[in-house]
Amino acid sequence: MTTSLTRRAAFGLLAAPALASVGRAAGWAPDRPVKIIVPFPPGGGLDLVGRVLADALAPELGQPVVVDNRAGAAGALGIEQVYQATPDGQTLGITSSGNITIGPLLRRTPYQPMALTHVSRLTTSPLMLVARKGLPVPDLDAFLTWMRARPDEVRFASAGIGSSTHLSLELLNIRLGTRTMNVPYRGTTPMLTDLAAGTVDVAFADATGWPLIEQGALRLLAISSGEPWARSPATPTLDSRVGDFRVTNWYGLVAPPKLPAPVLARFEEETAKALALPKVQQAYAASGFTASPLPQAQFHPFLESEIKLWEGVIETAKIEKEG
């Protein structure tokens, strides 16, 4: 009897650390500051989304959540660091189409985009079809008629070859059976500057172009999402005129591959709670974003559908891939 009890006691001592570990995992919480890597410099859309989220997550996680800007290689550098990090819940990142669903289709990346743990979609915003002030069209229908009548003449600006603004104009050409002149720029700011100056005719712009619309320097013709946009509800959607045209800019929360299920569940829960906060929704709305949470089970299929869409556009438009 004494021997049996001794063995049982010894087994209990050996099992205790394992059981404690399981208990901690089931109610996982970080034991030191959590880092969110933003793969672009401070001040942009990804940075804003990351910082607002970090401020909302910190009180719930019980640890500081710090933003670490790691710019380089069109966003690939920062996401590579997330990809290579230990999957312990201490390192997260902010993603977009440029580094997950479009960029990797056109250039090699030092990570496998869909091997990452895509925790949740965070925000969405439509692209805006904007025209120079002097373009002789009063509305979207008149513009589409004007564009169809001028093959290879319409100067359609983009923020660079392979950018979401470029692929969106190619998608519009595919849907309409038209041809336009792509005028690529090195980023959104110079593109919008030249559009406001009348150097080019039209472009797809993200939410950063809104101040120019408010100032009257650009004219808003349409939005790219399938539903009306709360910021400008009277603006028509391209989907309603062109058909099968639903394009959104999105930002997501990502973690290293093979993130343990309890850690993923905690981040999904806390992210959903953060995005439901009025102060978070208001901060995003002020910059043209809509809090649009999708947990991993829905976010992953969404990303796969985005990849399929842009693969088709790249193939049909014969856009060259790097390397």
Image (cartoon, rainbow, N blue to C red):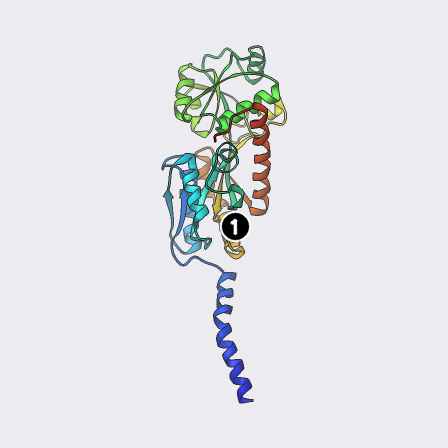
Q: Can residue 279 be seen in this view?
A: no
Count of numbered circles in the view: 1
Give x and y (percent) for residue 142: 57, 14
Position in image of residue 225 (x %, y %): 56, 30
Is 194 placed above or below 78 here? above
User: Who's the residue at 52% across and 57% down the image?
Assistant: 262
- Identify residue type, mark 1: Glu
Residue under numbered circle 1: 268
Where's the N terminus, which quadrant? bottom right
Q: Which residue is drawn at 43% across and 29% down?
A: 208
Residue drawn at the location 50% of the way across and 53% of the way down: 259
- Residue 295: x and y in percent read 55, 46
Q: Is residue 295 above or below residue 145?
A: below
Q: Which of 88 and 194 is in front in this view?
A: 88
User: Can residue 17 be seen here?
Assistant: yes
Sort mark 1 into few (<14), some (14-19) or many (20+) by Cα contacts within 10 Å: many
When the figure is inspected, residue 105 is found, relative to residue 137, above or below; the finding is below
Horizontal relation, residue 300 to residue 277: left or right: right
Q: Nearer the viewer, residue 26 or 107?
A: 107
Callout 1 secondary element? helix
